[in-house]
Amino acid sequence: MEQRSLAVVHYHEIALKGKNRAFFEKALVFNLRAALGADAAVSRIGGRILVQYGMAEEEAREKLKKIFGVKYFAFAKESAAEMDAIKKTSLGILDKPYPSDFRIEASRADKNYPFTSDDLMREVGAYVKEKTGMAVRLKHPAVTVFIEVAEKKAFIYSEKIPGAGGLPVGVAGKVVVLMSSGFDSPVAALRMMRRGCDPVLVHFHSYPYTARDSMENVEKLATVISHYSPRPIKLYLVSFLGVQERIVKSAPAALLTIMYRRWMLKIAEEVARRESALALVTGDAVSQVASQTLENILTVSEAATLPILRPLAGFDKEEIIAEAARYGTYGISSLPYGDCCSLFTAGSPATRSRLTDVKKVEGLIGEELAALAEKALISAEIKYIL
């Protein structure tokens, strides 16, 4: 049998979906095809997904590691589901010099074969031992040969490569992520993607009062995020300067950051309506900074009617930074940038803001702010990041 470049993809959470399982499987198949290109052949086979790819194995490895919904994958050799063929293929995947010991781990997708999983492990193990002189070691062997039999074929490999886990991007609907170029919001976006959400990014800037570095960094971060998405990432770059300048004229210094965040949510919610998104996402972590106390979160959240998801709410900074390193956003988020939320502010924001105080200010200038927010959205720069 001519050997093909094959990867066997396994999932976990999708298997728990019952009658909806086919929907999630099809989404994962779509995302695999999108990541691996038009030359890839992707099919469901016996509770797993078989991928035939047309690129170098290392390139395929890096792409498969970034596909949410994949528990683990393996680069496998294929043989007929016949004992002699399985024996020879199992021996063929072992590199010389042979390691000291091994074991065989076998499974069958169904029971319509003339051999059991135990038969496979016993007979293939004996064959490999005879041909190589390796010892059989059931616990902690130097190498494990995995044999999976499904639909009259056997797939044989010796390395399970961890995937990104979670659910395929797109199965949970669209969300709008309020995106800075710091550590938190890119990780928040990726964690929601891991739950099947399709992100639209909104970045607020105060150029030319702040440099363009925040916009440039966010575009770089969006590029990293796009590697985990089957579709280009849509990015809104929104000038927030006009809204800020009007708030500064009327609001007490202690409420500036709180009001900035409220109007960012209002603009992001309008983006969500245009994009048919179902929720907003922020990188807030409870009590990480003064504006993220529970009192301030309550005051800020009142500005929106859509659900606000905060996937990092219970994380500390070290955990967030570790996630950033794992996803590949750490280096970019470490770069300096101009934060529009700190523009015009002096001292610390109120840690226990009262909604009545904010509403009093918005009662005086709310119509002006709404017009400025609409203008900011109309003039927003929209980019599609690949």
Image (spheres, helix red, strand yellow):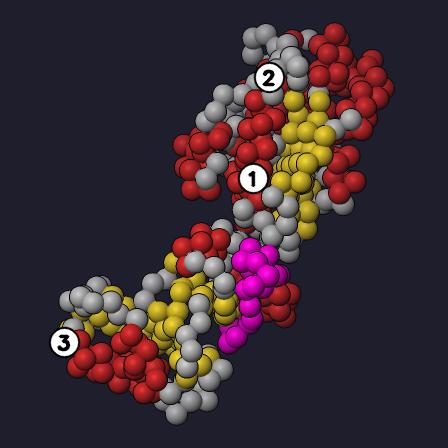
Q: Mark 1 points at which residue?
A: 223
Left or right side of 334 for 17: right
Earlier in the chain: of badge 2 and badge 1, it is 2
Q: Name the residue under label 3.
A: 133
Instruction: Say which amino acid is labelled 2.
Output: Ala
Asked where in the image residue 354 lies, by quadrant, the reply is top right
Q: Which residue is drawn at 62% across and 69% down?
A: 22
**37 magenta-colored:** yes
Instruction: Say which amino acid is labelled 1.
Output: Thr
- Tell me residue 55's x, y (percent): 47, 59
Q: Name the residue under label 2.
A: 211
Q: Can residue 138 be seen in this view?
A: yes
**269 magenta-colored:** no
Q: Is residue 28 visible?
A: no
Say which quadrant the C terminus sits in: top right
| SS class, disc 2 | loop
| SS class, disc 1 | helix
- Tell me residue 52's x, y (percent): 50, 68
Closer to the camera in the image, 106 or 93: 93
Q: Residue at x 71, y 27 (%)?
A: 238
